[in-house]
Image (spheres, rainbow, N blue to C red):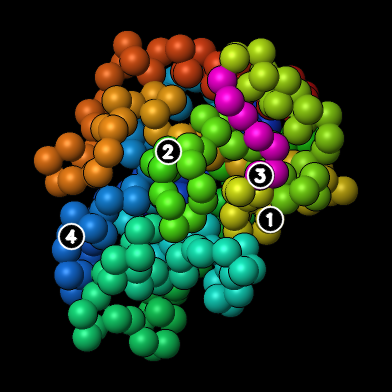
């Protein structure tokens, strides 16, 4: 199943990989800088996970700056009291204004929700229902990445592997502990339910009592890309995907996804 911007690749295993932030398409325009509008993309996330598991994939080509399909559509903050971005962001992660005098109003936000947010989550819900009809358990694994340093959002260097379960409510502890154990064994810095506890997808889809276990992995980009030291500029960002550099992390992620499948089965 696919659309111009929405892509669903089906498998029959009880694992779904959601990729809400890998897109760079800017169909609405009006941004002060297209580069700013794309800067906070989860760069090369599809390449990072390609071929690591037999899993259904739900992905969007639309940039998160147009509409963030991993935010609460009501506009309620997922992280009260902390800096974050909105359903239709008006700033970058660094606080740069994305628009001049043309920021989306309520009508425009509603239109973008109907065009992009609702179909994305309808597709994800349909895949969860399809696989739950076949399996007692389904794991929704939300794939993310972010720059290692974003002072507006967090202090210092972000751990390389950030596991989110919204304080243990979106999946069984056995799944959380299995993923965390592999992260620890990899020797990489990691945290469970730290700064990133899981976005709308994890919190909305996770329903362990009814067999749907959702977990988010937020990966610091230095773990798989040659992240520049110092300021990020249009000359050095985004880094190119280097398969050799990403190989060691890909092996860790392969083990994590295998653990997700083992748990579901």
User: Who comes first in sequence, dot 2 or dot 3?
Assistant: 2
User: Who comes first in sequence, dot 2 or dot 4?
Assistant: 4
Residue designated by label 4: 34
Residue 114 vertical position relative to residue 218 in the rendered view, above or below: below
Secondary structure beneath dot 3 equals loop
Q: Do the residues labelled 1 and 2 touch (CB within 8 Å)?
A: no
Query: CA–CA distance between discs 2 and 3?
Result: 14 Å
Q: In front: mark 4 or mark 3?
A: 3
Residue designated by label 2: 148
Q: Quick one: which residue is furthest to the right in this view?
A: 209
Say the numbered circle drawn on residue 203.
1
Decide if residue 114 is on the left or right side of residue 258.
Answer: left
Say the numbered circle drawn on residue 184.
none
Range shown magenta: 188-194
User: Who comes first in sequence, dot 4 or dot 1?
Assistant: 4
Secondary structure beneath dot 4 equals helix
| Image quarter (top left, top right, bottom left or bottom right) of the N terminus | top left
Q: Do the residues labelled 2 and 4 touch (CB within 8 Å)?
A: no
Of residues 107 and 11, the one nearer the viewer is 107
How far across and down, in percent of the image, does residue 73 sit? Answer: 55, 72
Q: In front: mark 3 or mark 1?
A: 3
Q: Would you say residue 83 sits in the magenta stretch? A: no
Residue designated by label 3: 194
Query: CA–CA distance between discs 4 and 3?
Result: 31 Å
Residue sitting at x 70%, y 26%? 180
| Circle 3 residues within 10 Å: few <14, some 14–19, many ≥20 | some
User: Who comes first in sequence, dot 1 or dot 2?
Assistant: 2
How far across and down, in percent of the image, does residue 245 sit? Answer: 34, 15
Query: CA–CA distance between discs 2 and 4?
Result: 22 Å
Query: CA–CA distance between discs 1 and 2?
Result: 24 Å
Residue 225 vertical position relative to residue 33 in the rendered view, above or below: above
Residue sitting at x 72%, y 20%? 181
């Amino acid at each position: 199943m696919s659309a111009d911007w929405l892509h669903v690749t089906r498998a029959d295993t009880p694992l779904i990989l959601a990729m809400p932030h890998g897109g760079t398409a800017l169909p609405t325009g009006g941004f002060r800088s297209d580069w700013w509008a794309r800067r906070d993309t989860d760069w090369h996330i599809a390449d990072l996970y390609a071929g690591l598991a037999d899993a259904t994939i739900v992905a969007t080509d639309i940039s998160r700056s147009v509409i963030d399909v991993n935010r609460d559509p009501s506009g309620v903050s997922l992280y009260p009291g902390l800096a974050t971005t909105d359903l239709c962001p008006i700033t970058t992660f660094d606080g740069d204004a994305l628009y001049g005098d043309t920021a989306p109003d309520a009508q425009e936000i509603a239109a973008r929700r109907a065009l992009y947010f609702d179909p994305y989550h309808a597709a994800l819900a349909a895949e969860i229902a399809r696989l739950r009809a076949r399996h007692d358990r389904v794991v929704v694994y939300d794939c993310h990445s972010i720059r290692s340093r974003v002072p507006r959002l967090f202090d210092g260097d972000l751990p390389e592997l950030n596991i989110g379960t919204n304080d243990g409510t979106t999946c069984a502890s056995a799944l959380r502990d299995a993923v965390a154990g592999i992260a620890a064994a990899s020797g990489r810095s990691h945290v469970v339910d730290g700064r990133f506890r899981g976005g709308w997808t994890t919190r909305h889809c996770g329903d362990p009592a009814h067999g749907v276990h959702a977990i988010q992995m937020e990966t610091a980009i230095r773990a798989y890309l040659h992240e520049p030291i110092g300021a990020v500029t249009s000359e050095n960002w985004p880094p190119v995907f280097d398969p050799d550099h990403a190989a060691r992390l890909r092996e860790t992620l392969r083990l994590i996804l295998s653990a997700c499948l083992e748990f579901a089965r």
